[in-house]
Amino acid sequence: MLTGMQIAVIGGDARQLEIIRKLTELDSKLSLIGFEQLDHAFSGAIKEKLDEVDFSNIDSIILPVPGTSLDGQIETIFSNEKVYLSEEVLMKTPPHCTIYSGITNSYLNAITKKANRRLVQLFSRDDVAIYNSIPTVEGTIMMAIQHTDFTIHGSKTIVLGLGRVGMSVARTFASLGARVQVGARKSEHIARITEMGLTPFHINDLAQHVRDVDICINTIPHLVVSASVISRMPSHTLIIDLASKPGGTDFRYAEKRGIKALLAPGLPGIVAPKTAGQILANVLSQLLQDDFQSRKGKVT
């Protein structure tokens, strides 16, 4: 239980509702910032504006999956007002206050470091990323069906990267009958791709493998689907970029060539927000309980 713990939930999408529901069930006290237009009421949760919150009592701050923008803005679909997180706000919190976010960036890293507050990236955890790969794969299949006039079965599909998402995508598309090739850099990934019964290649040789590709799915957050690679693709190729913004595709050149390229980060929150929210809620609640018990132990 989290009885007596004060938590600020700032912004977010429908995934945050599952987090709020779970934390109120555990008897924590929540300040909901950026939720003015949320119709649903949660027992133990109060809607507040940022300047109304007494941050000196806040034990934890929960940000949405994207964290903040590079100027500190926090996205929320439940408010028309812009919400910003600053170093000044963090400095008002107790020294033990922990900030939880899905991912981070240079701005969020900088303000948490200057304020000397602990930042936890949920998506850097293997359990969150693996669970989250399930709705990501389903969303990728949905996009592939919506934006092509051919079946996944029999298509030549290239998956770039064999991380936690790439592995799930490659395995699933292969099970649907696609002819899957996977591009990777590490020798152990090349070996794993072979063990999976798929066709591996080194990412540096990507341009040699795209001449007859139907679907190209990128999970690498660096520019790998470059203009030189896209210039060798057939005009019907569909590119689905699952990497975090700005992705790993030259979208300008893809548009110039008439190739459909879709940037699709955050698919779980779009196609299955309830499940994606429950994944985050379960992990968050355990982390918060561990942190709460640890602090109570130090006090006693």
Image: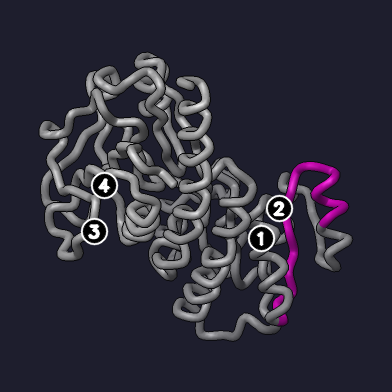
On the rendered structure, is 192 left or right of 219? Answer: right
Decide: marks 1, 2 in contact (CB < 8 A)? yes
Residue 176 image offset from top left, x and y in percent: 68, 81
Alpha-carbon span between mark 3 and mark 1: 42 Å
Q: Nearer the viewer, residue 13 or 255?
A: 13
Q: Identify residue type, mark 1.
A: Val
Of label 1 and label 4, which has the lower sequence position? 4
Alpha-carbon span between mark 3 and mark 2: 40 Å
For discs 1 and 4, the disc positioned in front in the rendered view: 4
On residue 42, the disc is 3
Of label 2 and label 4, which has the lower sequence position? 4
Residue 226 image offset from top left, x and y in percent: 55, 48
Q: Which residue is mark 1?
A: 159
Q: Identify residue type, mark 2.
A: Leu
SS type, badge 4: loop
Mark 2 nearby-residue class (10 Å; few <14, some 14–19, many ≥20): many
Q: Is residue 255 magenta?
A: no
Q: Is residue 32 above or below residue 18?
A: above
Q: Nearer the viewer, residue 260 or 200?
A: 200
Q: Which residue is mark 2?
A: 162
Q: Is residue 68 visible?
A: no
Span shown in magenta: 177-192
Q: Identify residue type, mark 4.
A: Gly
Alpha-carbon span between mark 1 and mark 2: 8 Å
Of label 3 and label 2, which has the lower sequence position? 3
Instruction: Please report the residue visible at 47 percent of the width from the left and 46 percent of the height from the top.
Output: 284
Q: Which residue is mark 4?
A: 11
Of label 3 and label 1, which has the lower sequence position? 3
